[in-house]
Image: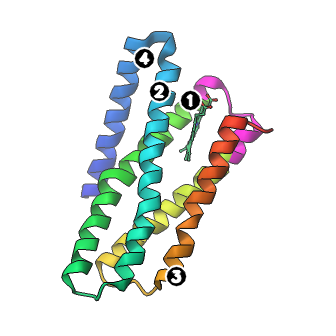
Amino acid sequence: MSTPAIRAIVALIITVVAFAAVSVVAGSAAYDWLKALHVIAIISWMAAMLYLPRLFIYHCDAEKGSKQSETFKVMEGRLLRLIMNPAMIVAWVLGLWLAWQAGFWMSGWFHAKLLAVIALSACHGYFSASVRAFAEDRNTKPASHWRLVNEVPTVLMILIVVLVVVKPF
Ligand code: HEM
């Protein structure tokens, strides 16, 4: 089994154990505790999603094969594997559980949030493929491309937070 698959399984196991522990310890307050965990996971996911394209911007200016370029590769790989991937898994698992518990499946705001989160996850997939491209010195995109792409998670995050907090429809 590949290392990312093992990490994904470990993140899932930690989430399930946290679920069980919170349900037993917190009882009827479990929803609020798990919502707090969901928000903590989202903060970690978004921090990484906003930082990674900034690393790509600086990486574009580093000469291929240079010490600086190799350092960026290590930073990007670690950010993706240690923070971005596990945080996304935990956010998804807890978010779906919250929606199931509260019965939000038929709410318009939830459908819109889900669409925006799927777009955010697609953006995650693109960043993940780009980490691989940079690691193999295959990136052909200029820094201006990464500056523009950097705005996508920001716009989606604003949309998602307004939808879930205001619930406008
Ligand atoms: C990954 C898939 C996601 C699902 C299925 C999901 C689902 C949910 C659900 C059902 C709630 C509970 C809402 C309530 O109790 O009123 C919630 C809370 C929240 N979610 Fe998500 N969410 C996801 C991802 C995200 C993302 C990406 C963000 C931000 C960028 C986000 C931000 C929040 C915030 C701030 C709350 C707390 C809202 C409040 O208490 O008023 N979620 N989420």
Single out the residue that lies furthest toward the right. Answer: 169
Which numbered mark, 3 or 4, is in the foreground of this view?
Answer: 3
Specify which label sits upstream in the sequence, 3 or 1. 1
Specify which label sits upstream in the sequence, 2 or 3. 2
Q: Amino acid at mark 2?
A: Leu
Say which residue label 4 marks: 23
- Residue 98: numbered disc: 1
Q: Is mark 4 within 8 Å of ligand 1?
A: no
Q: Which residues are magenta?
A: 100-112
Secondary structure under badge 1? Answer: helix
Q: Amino acid at mark 3?
A: Ser
Which numbered mark, 2 or 3, is in the foreground of this view?
Answer: 3
Secondary structure under badge 4? Answer: helix
Q: Please name whichever residue, 114 or 47, is drawn nearer the observer in this view of the structure.
A: 47
Which numbered mark, 2 or 1, is in the foreground of this view?
Answer: 2
Name the magenta segment's main secondary structure.
helix
- Residue 34: numbered disc: 2
Is the residue marked by circle 3 packed among few (<14), some (14-19), or many (20+) residues within 10 Å? few
Q: Is residue 114 visible?
A: no
Q: Amino acid at mark 4?
A: Ser
Determine whether, in the image, residue 29 is placed left or right of residue 22.
right
Does residue 10 show up magenta in the picture? no
Whether pointer 1 and pointer 4 mark residues with C-beta atoms closer than 8 Å, the reply is no
Say which residue label 3 marks: 144
Rendered location of residue 63, percent (x, y): 29, 88
